[in-house]
Image (cartoon, rainbow, N blue to C red):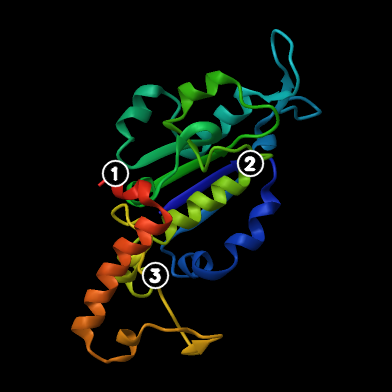
Amino acid sequence: MLIDILTLFPSVFESVFSESIIRKAIEKKIVKIKITNIRDYAEGNHRMVDDKQYGGGVGMIMMVPPIVKAIEKITGLSGMRKRDKAKDKLKVILLSPQGKIFTQKKALELSKYKHLVFVCGHYGGVDERLLRFVDEELSVGDYVLTGGEIPAMVVVDSVVRLIPDVVGKSDSIKNDSLWNNKLANAVYTRPYNFRELKVPKVLLSGNHKNIEKWRKESIIKNTFKKRPDLLEQN
């Protein structure tokens, strides 16, 4: 998979993508991540990427031309018809608090694409006309951050770990929380007794049938206790 990220702050991604599972996926050449500075596609001596909004108002707005130029250069597609034909392999996404909420289901969907392009919004927002040049607008939650860089990291991390051969034991991701709208079962490790809080005896029994039964029951209990809203969606 090729992942392109368009941002005004390229350096913020360096440490995140050089560690852990993301780094291993890059080393295995399963994923290639390219960071593009939107300012490189701005015109004029000052390379302006933002301006005051029409009609007045507080905050600077990101301009459309530099972002669209970057998208077209990266994808090699300049016409909407060409983009439409490539939609099964390519998806261009704007990270914005106005987008649809990102979910595990969406992460699984995105993991099947060949090429993902993420546009990181910033300042007081992005010129609304950009929506004509992206396929989707996503938000990582109902709150506002200073820019789309952290959301881009969240989405990329979530998507990459779902790509085949990225996680060592691929079946383990099916035991993740939020898979099939349920939380994972409760888990324990040493010590057995911590301040009179003990590990359930069944997990020490060695009886795999009983342990599996306990885990299935724990999934329901854990979900009902922490996120009962998820059970209503099933």
Label located before the other in sequence (2 or 3): 2
The residue that disc 1 covers is: 233
Q: Residue at x 26, y 68 (%)?
A: 217
SS under mark 3:
loop
Amino acid carrying mark 3 in the image: Val
Task: Tell me if I can see residue 184 in this picture.
Answer: yes
Q: What is the distance, in whole Å, between disc 2 and disc 1 at their CAs?
A: 35 Å
Amino acid carrying mark 2 in the image: Thr
Image x and y of residue 150, in percent: 61, 48
- For residue 135, side relative to residue 127 (left or right): left
Check the image and report above or below for 215 versus 9: below
Q: Residue at x 54, y 18 (%)?
A: 129
Give me the disc on residue 167: 3
The residue closer to the viewer here, 108 or 187, is 187
The residue that disc 2 covers is: 7
Q: Residues within 10 Å of mark 2 (few under 14, many from 20)?
A: many
Q: Residue at x 68, y 37 (%)?
A: 40
Label located before the other in sequence (3 or 1): 3
Question: Which image quarter is the N terminus in?
Answer: bottom left
Q: Residues within 10 Å of mark 1 (few under 14, many from 20)?
A: few
